Image (cartoon, rainbow, N blue to C red):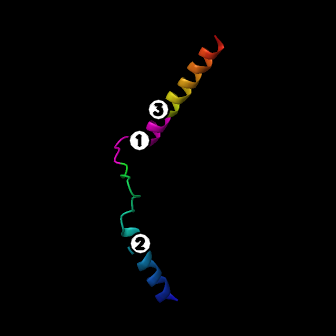
Amino acid sequence: MVRGILVWLVLCGTVMAEPPATLPSTQPLTWDDDLADRMMGGLHRFVERKIERAVANRL
């Protein structure tokens, strides 16, 4: 039983130690800033565009 747990831990450790694979034609994220801030900024821009279009369609 203990041997099985040790083998499992070693195997998990080697899987976790490998760098994550990237998909073809992609690059890993290298941003240093907060990703949540980037996402919220994009969402705010999206909503502002939608509001501007709604106002323009009312006139």
Q: Which mark is residue 41?
A: 3
Q: Is 22 included in the stretch rendered in magenta?
A: no
Residue 42: % across, % down: 48, 33
Residue 39: % across, % down: 48, 38
Q: Between marks 3 and 1, how big is the CA–CA gap?
A: 11 Å
Q: Which residue is mark 2?
A: 15
Q: Which mark is residue 34?
A: 1
Q: Is 39 included in the stretch rendered in magenta?
A: yes
Kind of residue at badge 3: Gly
Disc number lying in front (3 or 1): 3
Magenta extent: 30-41
Residue 20: % across, % down: 39, 62
Kind of residue at badge 1: Asp
Q: Is residue 50 above or below residue 33?
A: above
Q: Which residue is at the front of the view, 31 or 23?
A: 23
User: Where, quadrant-wise, is the C terminus in this rendering?
Assistant: top right
Circles 3 and 2 in contact, beta carbons < 8 Å = no
Mark nearer the N terminus (3 vs 2): 2
